[in-house]
Image (spheres, grey):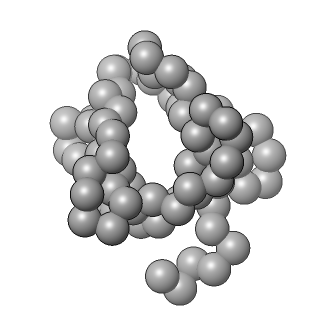
Amino acid sequence: MEGYLLKKNKYWMKQERLFRLYIDGTIKYFKKTEQKGTMILKPGQRAIKDGTKNISIPTDKKDYILIQLSDLSK
């Protein structure tokens, strides 16, 4: 499964990234074709909805804040 979302970085700036969810629970995200990072999800880990468009995914390394794009036609 894949799609575009906005990711907030450590300076709270929003960055558009392509996210790919793999069957093993790994999420990789890309800027164009360059892989920028990986989230490794563990069993029982949950995304937390904290707004109408925002979700937070806490991992061992950091908390990721993702935002739905206004234009879903991409």
In this rendering, would 57 be left or right of 52? left
What quarter of the picture does the N terminus occupy? bottom left
Outermost residue, left direction?
A: 24
Res 31 → quadrant: bottom left
Residue 19 image offset from top left, x and y in percent? 38, 55
Query: Exactly how many numbered labels are in the figure?
Result: 0
The correct choice, above or below, for 71 with respect to 22 in the image is: below
Residue 39 image offset from top left, x and y in percent? 35, 33
Res 6 → quadrant: bottom right
In this rendering, would 50 be left or right of 1? right
The correct choice, above or below, for 39 with respect to 71 in the image is: above
In this rendering, would 60 be left or right of 48? left
Outermost residue, bottom direction?
A: 73
Residue 68 image offset from top left, x and y in percent? 63, 61
**Between residues 60 and 32, which one lies in front from this camera angle?**
32
Residue 66 visible within the image = no
Q: Residue at x 63, y 80 (%)?
A: 71
Residue 13 visible within the image = yes
**Between residues 30 and 24, which one lies in front from this camera angle?**
30
**Between residues 65 and 2, which one lies in front from this camera angle?**
65
Outermost residue, front direction?
A: 11
